[in-house]
Every structure is written in structure tokens, then in C-alpha cells.
Image (spheres, helix red, strand yellow):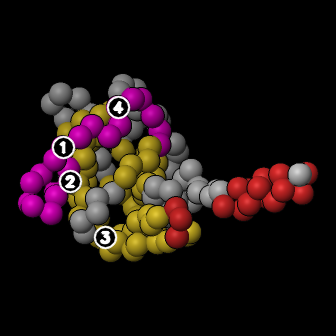
């Protein structure tokens, strides 16, 4: 009887998955001054994302909303992602990313996740000075991908 219980317990333990909780690849953005110092927004910054579905419909969602010096955002499963940074009611900047999508399977039981290779970055300059692509590979490893530069009084 004890041997049967050990086999059952052992069998259950071998079939359980340890699927990673970090199965989403997020692009990480850091806010910096022109001199490279970290900048924290003085008020909430709202980031809106636009996703185009397979039927051509555009969906909008608020992805981020707080005062911060860094944030991480999901990318679209299409080859382009658009974010709008709402600095205030009157001041907004748009960031356009193009990327190659790379399906990745770590474990067949856990399904697949999407990794990305950023191929280009464009942006408006209403409150932003520039954006530097630091790491074009967006995976689930939580590495910095972009530096966003502002002109600020030091």
C-alpha cells in the first residue's frame, strides 16, 4: 500500500508543469535627462496602446498610468506597435515601433510566447527629445530596451 501511494505521488509530481510566470515579453522604457540621469515624471503619465486586429479593426487600451521613471509595455502581435504618451491633457507624444515577431516555445505544455526584434523606432518631439534603442531584443528577461530622453532643468 505504501509503495502504491509513492508511485501515485511521484507520478503526479512528474506530470506537473512549472510554467514560468514571466511568459510575456515586455518592452522596457527608462526616462532620462539629456545628461543621462534618471528622471521621474512629476505627474502621472498615461500610455495608450493601439493594436490592429486581423480584421483591420483598431483597438485602444490604457497600458500604464502613474508617475514613474521606468515602465514596461506589451507589444502587438502584428509587426507594428503604437504608443501614445499623454504627458498632460494638451501635450502628447507618439512612439511607433516596427518589429519582427519571433514565436518561442520553452515547454510544449506551457504553450508559446512571442519574442520581438525591434527594427525601427519613430516618435514625435512634443515633450520628448529622443529615444535610443538600447537592446533590440524584447524577451521575458526584463532587460532595458529603450532610453527616452527629456530636456529637464538639472
Q: Residue furthest left?
A: 56
In the rendered image, residue 81, in percent from the top left (x then y), is placed at: 25, 59
Residues at circles 4 and 2 in contact by the CB criterion of under 8 Å: no
Q: Is residue 67 magenta?
A: yes
Q: Which residue is mark 4?
A: 65
Residues at circles 4 and 3 in contact by the CB criterion of under 8 Å: no
Residue 54 versus residue 82 in the image, above or below: below
* Residue at 56% over, 69% down: 107
User: Front-most of 42 and 144?
Assistant: 144
Q: Is residue 97 magenta?
A: no
Which label's residue is closer to the chain start, 3 or 2?
2
Which label's residue is closer to the chain start, 4 or 1?
1
Task: Tell whether 95 sits left or right of 41.
Answer: left
Q: Which residue is mark 2?
A: 51
Rounded to the nearest whole Å, what is the CA distance between mark 3 and mark 2?
A: 14 Å
Residue 35 versus residue 68 in the image, above or below: below
In the rendered image, residue 87, in percent from the top left (x then y), is placed at: 27, 34
Residues at circles 2 and 1 in contact by the CB criterion of under 8 Å: yes
Range of the magenta residues?
A: 50-70
Which label's residue is closer to the chain start, 1 or 3?
1
Amino acid at each position: 500500500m505504501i509503495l502504491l501511494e509513492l508511485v501515485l505521488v511521484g507520478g503526479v509530481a512528474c506530470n506537473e508543469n512549472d510554467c514560468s510566470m514571466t511568459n510575456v515579453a515586455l518592452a522596457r522604457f527608462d526616462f532620462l535627462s539629456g545628461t543621462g540621469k534618471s528622471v521621474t515624471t512629476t505627474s502621472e503619465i498615461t500610455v495608450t496602446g493601439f493594436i490592429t486586429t486581423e480584421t483591420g479593426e483598431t483597438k485602444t487600451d490604457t497600458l500604464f498610468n502613474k508617475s514613474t521613471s521606468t515602465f514596461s509595455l506589451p507589444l502587438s502581435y502584428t509587426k507594428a506597435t503604437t504608443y501614445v504618451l499623454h504627458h498632460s491633457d494638451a501635450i502628447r507624444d507618439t512612439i511607433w515601433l516596427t518589429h519582427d515577431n519571433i514565436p518561442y516555445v520553452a515547454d510544449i505544455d506551457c504553450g508559446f510566447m512571442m519574442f520581438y526584434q525591434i527594427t525601427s523606432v519613430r516618435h514625435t518631439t512634443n515633450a520628448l527629445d529622443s529615444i535610443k534603442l538600447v537592446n533590440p531584443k524584447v524577451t521575458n528577461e526584463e532587460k532595458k530596451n529603450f532610453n527616452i530622453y527629456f530636456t529637464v532643468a538639472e
